[in-house]
């Protein structure tokens, strides 16, 4: 595991950040890295998966269902998260960047669609 660097948020701040809170300006470089460097989509989905973990743990202890059903329910929880949130990662990222006062990266595909929308 990597050691914390100056400017990295604490674990509690990271959980709040994943849940939608804005970090203080001292963490702006970390937010820029988190949302623009390679692997940002996996980090975003991973953070949301961490928020779902308490619900997955509750599913383990639901009474009246067998072990296979519990495992399938947990699998459905995470697959459903990926299917519903996966396509919206770009919008979530852009919203977080704006909220932290950072520029939104240009999307060449979106620019191409706007130029060629007359067809």
Image (tube, rainbow, N blue to C red):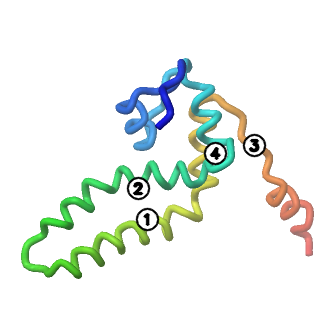
For discs 2 and 3, the disc positioned in front in the rendered view: 2
Q: Are the residues flagged by discs 1 and 3 in contact, CB closer than 8 Å?
A: no
Residue picked out by circle 4? 94
Instruction: Give the CA distance from mark 4 to mark 1.
Output: 19 Å
Taking depth in this image into account, of 111 and 83 the one nearest to the observer is: 83
For discs 4 and 1, the disc positioned in front in the rendered view: 1
On screen, residue 83 above or below 103: below
Among all residues in the image, which is located at the extreme left?
64
Q: Are the residues flagged by discs 2 and 3 in contact, CB closer than 8 Å?
A: no
112 lies left or right of 12? right
Q: Which mark is residue 105?
A: 3
Q: Earlier in the sequence, mark 4 or mark 1?
A: 1
Horizontal and vertical percent position of residue 4: 48, 26
Q: Tag 4, which secondary structure?
A: helix
On screen, residue 64 above or below 30: below
Instruction: Give the CA distance from mark 2 to mark 3.
Output: 25 Å
Q: Earlier in the sequence, mark 2 or mark 1?
A: 2
Q: Tag 3, which secondary structure?
A: loop
Number of marks drawn: 4
Residue picked out by circle 2? 49
Instruction: Give the CA distance from mark 4 to mark 3.
Output: 8 Å
Horizontal and vertical percent position of residue 29: 62, 26
57 lies left or right of 108? left
83 lies left or right of 28? left
Task: Identify which residue is drawn at 38% across, 32% down.
Answer: 11
Task: Identify which residue is drawn at 37% across, 51% down.
Answer: 50
Residue picked out by circle 1? 81
Task: Identify which residue is drawn at 40% across, 56% down.
Answer: 49
Q: Earlier in the sequence, mark 2 or mark 3?
A: 2
């Amino acid at each position: 595991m990597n050691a914390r660097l100056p400017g990295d948020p604490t674990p509690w701040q990271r959980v709040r950040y994943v849940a939608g809170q804005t970090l203080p300006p001292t963490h702006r470089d970390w937010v820029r890295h988190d949302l623009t460097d390679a692997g940002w989509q996996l980090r975003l989905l991973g953070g949301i998966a961490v928020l779902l973990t308490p619900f997955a743990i509750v599913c383990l202890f639901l009474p009246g269902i067998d072990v296979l059903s519990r495992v399938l329910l947990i699998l459905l929880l995470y697959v459903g998260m990926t299917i519903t949130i996966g396509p919206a990662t770009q919008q979530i990222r852009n919203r977080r960047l704006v909220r932290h006062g950072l520029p939104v990266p240009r999307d060449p595909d979106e620019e191409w669609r706007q130029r060629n929308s007359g067809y």
